[in-house]
Image (spheres, grey):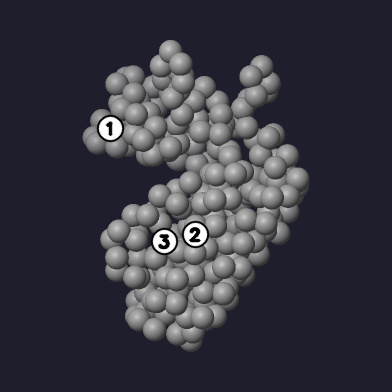
Amino acid sequence: MATSLNQLSISTLADECHQAIKRAILNLDLQPGAPIDEGQLAEQLGISKTPVREAIARLTGEGFVVPGPGRRSSIAPLSVMATREIFEVRILLESSVARFVAPRLTDEDLAQLEQALETTDEALRTDNLYEFVMSAHEFHSRLVDCAANSHLSKIAAKLFDHTKMITSAIYRSEQEAAQHQLSQSGIENHRAILAALKQRDGELAASLLTRDIQTYLDAINTDEIQRAFERLSYRPGGAS
């Protein structure tokens, strides 16, 4: 299976290494719960172990890597409980943001939201998992950024980062089932949210945002999705 780990250039090596490994984690090319082999990562990326160690340290601080005994780290597991809590916080945060920004949105703001939506739609049509996940979250992050509050944007960005793994896992589970019902529903939800924002209807946009996030929250509580998460996660001695 092709992965998102490609060889890096010399420039900005530490940052590129961090982004490359983070992308592989979010894309589930590196399995949740899998032990990290710094030497293997360095070989795949065509670099020395030093920037890999720096990247692993940063990713540990961000919560994407979990330290273990004997300096053995692993990819953070898919945690249904932790994700549930994050989605609940997102509902509270983003519904409030929608009410606040709806009357203040500029034509440029709306155009950027629409562009993110169209990119998500195209990614689903072309079955581009990474682009789908990034652009779907970009829609939400751009809306938060419209509040023009740097502290709020930083809080939201951290929340979005950790729900990207779950969105990727749900998308991959849909690939296994040869259908993308939930992902398609997410696009339709975003269209409805954008329409409400164009009408400057903050209450409706807040309600639709809550429904959008709740759809994913409900999904991760189902046995079907939880079984899919188990299949996508690393199992010692199992197939990779």
Of labels 1 and 3, earlier in sequence is 1
Residue with the most extreme left position = 11
Residue with the most extreme bottom position = 199
- How would you rate the neighbour count of disc 2 (Cα within 10 Å): few for under 14, some for 14-19, many for 20 or more? many
Quadrant where the image shows the C terminus: top right
Q: Is residue 81 left or right of residue 89?
A: right
The residue that label 2 is drawn on is 90
What residue type is disc 2 on? Arg
Asked which quadrant contains residue 61, the reply is top left
Of labels 3 and 2, earlier in sequence is 2
- How would you rate the neighbour count of disc 1 (Cα within 10 Å): few for under 14, some for 14-19, many for 20 or more? some
Secondary structure of the residue carrying tag 1 is helix
- How would you rate the neighbour count of disc 3 (Cα within 10 Å): few for under 14, some for 14-19, many for 20 or more? some
The residue that label 1 is drawn on is 13
Of labels 1 and 2, earlier in sequence is 1
Question: Any mark on residue 141, and which?
Answer: 3
